[in-house]
């Protein structure tokens, strides 16, 4: 027994309590998720809900789609038609309704676009990838850090799109965030000296699909998401013993993406 502020405590009980605390903590900070699949299930449900909403409101080119997809220069709606490359002033002068993109104040699109899908194949492939990658990463990083990787990757993907894609291009889908998860998993596997061949194979397939696949695939979003996932995970690993600084650094990656996007609006 050892003395305590009130009464005595059993040494074995203290040791058991410390062991349980260590088991509850993740290797990179935070608490281990009791159900590592839950967060991915919620994200999948949100994506499906947005997809259903778009499907029920006219699909691609409908009002909801135009609001939540990422079109940097905005969309001009005239009746049932939608036009890009038209300024807000010209749009309203012609009797249209202008839906701004990030370059004109529609900042919500840098996140909502990551939950936006049109075709069943598109959402099906992305959600399958999320279901495979998400629980594996959350099991190692914990829920909060997994979500940080996911959303920071989406932000960095949007920053790459704003700088490298045409302002009249409409980009949508969770592919940027998914690419970030691939980058995160690669970093974690290499950090723990695991066999990275399977991860590299999936990354290679993603690269091939992006390069030689449909012209509608956003290489900017895929690349940006991958970079965001790698950077965020490296920060989490490097500062695993300094948790307040860890979160500040993770936030810093997201802030840099936001600053880059804000700078893009000044360029015009």
Image (spheres, grey):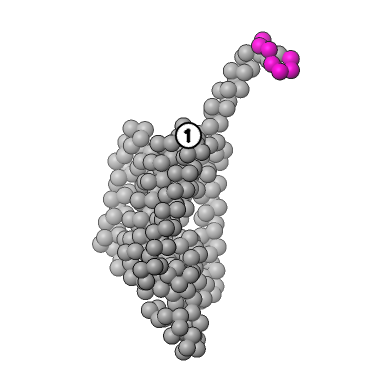
Looking at the image, is 243 positioned above or below residue 203?
above
Looking at the image, is 84 positioned above or below residue 37?
below
The crowding category of the residue bearing disc 1, from other C-alpha atoms within 10 Å (few below 14, some 14 to 19, many at least 20), is few
Q: Which residue occupies the extreme bottom position in the image?
A: 94
Quarter placement of the N terminus: top right
Q: Position of residue 120 (x, y in %)?
A: 45, 65
Q: Position of residue 243 (x, y in %)?
A: 50, 36
Residue where numbered disc 1 is placed: 242
Is 14 in front, or is 206? 14
Q: Is residue 3 magenta?
A: yes
Query: Residue at coordinates 32% horizontally, 64% vertically from top-left?
Result: 164
Q: Position of residue 156 (x, y in %)?
A: 40, 55
Quarter placement of the C terminus: bottom left
Local secondary structure at mark 1: loop
Q: Is residue 183 visible?
A: yes
Looking at the image, is 12 positioned above or below residue 187?
above
Query: Residue at coordinates 44% horizontally, 48% vertically from top-left?
Result: 252
Q: Is residue 212 magenta?
A: no
Residue range corresponding to the magenta coloring: 1-7
Is 256 in front, or is 227? 256
Q: Which residue occupies the extreme top position in the image?
A: 1
Q: Which residue occupies the extreme front position in the image?
A: 266
């Amino acid at each position: 027994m050892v003395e305590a502020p009130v009464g005595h405590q059993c040494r074995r009980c203290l040791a058991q309590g410390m062991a349980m605390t260590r088991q509850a903590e993740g290797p990179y900070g935070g608490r281990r998720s009791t159900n590592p699949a839950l967060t991915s299930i919620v994200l999948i449900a949100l994506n499906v809900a947005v997809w259903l909403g778009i499907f029920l409101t006219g699909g691609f080119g409908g009002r909801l789609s135009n609001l939540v997809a990422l079109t940097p220069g905005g969309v001009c709606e005239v009746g049932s038609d939608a036009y890009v490359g038209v300024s807000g002033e010209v749009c309203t002068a012609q009797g249209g309704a202008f839906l701004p993109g990030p370059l004109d104040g529609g900042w919500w699109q840098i996140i909502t676009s990551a939950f936006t899908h049109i075709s069943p194949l598109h959402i099906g492939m992305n959600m399958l990838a999320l279901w495979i990658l998400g629980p594996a990463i959350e099991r190692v990083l914990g829920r909060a850090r997994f979500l940080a990787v996911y959303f920071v990757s989406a932000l960095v993907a949007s920053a790459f799109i704003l700088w490298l894609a045409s302002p009249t291009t409409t980009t949508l889908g969770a592919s940027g965030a998914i690419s970030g998860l691939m980058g995160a998993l690669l970093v974690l596997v290499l950090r723990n000296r695991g066999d990275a061949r399977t991860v590299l194979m999936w990354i290679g397939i993603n690269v091939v699909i992006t390069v030689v696949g449909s012209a509608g695939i956003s290489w900017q979003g895929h690349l940006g998401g991958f970079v965001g996932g790698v950077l965020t995970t490296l920060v989490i690993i490097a500062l695993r013993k300094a948790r307040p600084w860890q979160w500040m650094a993770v936030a810093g990656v997201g802030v840099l993406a936001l600053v880059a996007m804000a700078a893009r609006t000044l360029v015009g």
